[in-house]
Amino acid sequence: MSAEAALRELICVLAKSMFDRGLTGGSTGNISARTQDGGLLVSPTGTSFGRLDPARLSRFDATGTLIDGDPPTKEMPLHTAFYDTRSTAGAVVHLHSCHSVALSMMPDVDAENFLPPLTPYAIMKLGRVKLLPFFLPGDPAMGDAVRGLAGKRSAVMLANHGPVVAGKDVEAACNAIEELEDTARLAMMTRGLTPKGLSNDQVQALVTKFDVDWDT
């Protein structure tokens, strides 16, 4: 099996796993990954994560031209914004995961640091998550908002919509976005219960030990 064929299969396997566990439903969510020649494989528009076909993924060449497969997700501006501004980005995932969306609706969340420091893992995998305002689905302004961050965040939360995460490869991106959703779920479960989270010193120790890109 070629490297690209293996990547196509992996994208579909990971997407189906997230769909099967309720992390994104219906035809929501989109996923992309860099190919060895600098192109992209992208989930097509209107497709379900539970039924992606490896042979029908949208295939872009290194110049950004669609050369094979079905038409891509309408959220391409989000994906290209991460690739263009983060040299380490090898994959991008966007979900409509319930708990992170619920947390984005809360009036007191910190837009600069969306996730509360409840466990080490979101800090280690995501750094600070930026909460972006609401945009209409498919609005290119979402990509503009990501570009405005100048590559300083690997993850953003679209208010009332869903998280978007860039990772070094497709497995890392999927693992990170699942951590985002898990942390949001913990935040919603403990909301109003004054949970004991990590202290500032503990957060800084994590940032130092694991070399986290902790933009301030």
Image (spheres, grey):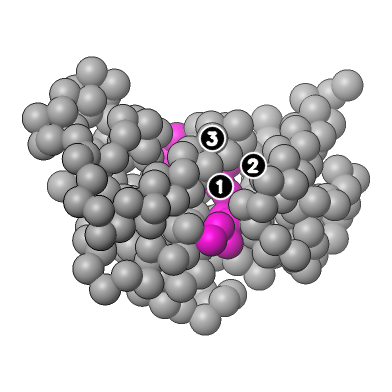
Secondary structure of residue under mark 1: strand
* Residue position for label 1: 92
Q: Residues within 10 Å of mark 2 (few under 14, many from 20)?
A: many
Report the side of 167 relative to 6 (left or right): left
Q: Amino acid at mark 2?
A: Ala
Q: Amino acid at mark 3?
A: Asn
For the magenta stretch, what is the residue range?
A: 86-98
Q: Residues within 10 Å of mark 1 (few under 14, many from 20)?
A: many
* Residue 131 image offset from top left, x and y in percent: 33, 62
Q: Amino acid at mark 1?
A: Val
- In this rendered view, identify the residue nearer to me: 200 or 89: 200
Vertical position of residue 69 compared to residue 210: above or below: below
Secondary structure of residue under mark 3: helix
**Distance from label 2 to label 1 (Cα)?**
6 Å
Vertical position of residue 153 compared to residue 203: above or below: below
* Residue position for label 2: 33
* Quadrant assignment, res 70: bottom right
Q: Is residue 73 visible?
A: yes
Identify the disc placed on residue 175. Answer: 3
Q: Are marks 2 and 3 in contact (CB under 8 Å)?
A: no
**Distance from label 3 to label 1 (Cα)?**
11 Å
Does the magenta stretch mainly form a helix, a strand or a loop?
Answer: loop
Q: Quadrant of the N terminus?
A: top right
- In this rendered view, identify the residue nearer to me: 104 or 157: 104
Task: Identify the residue at image location x=60%, y=66%.
Answer: 75
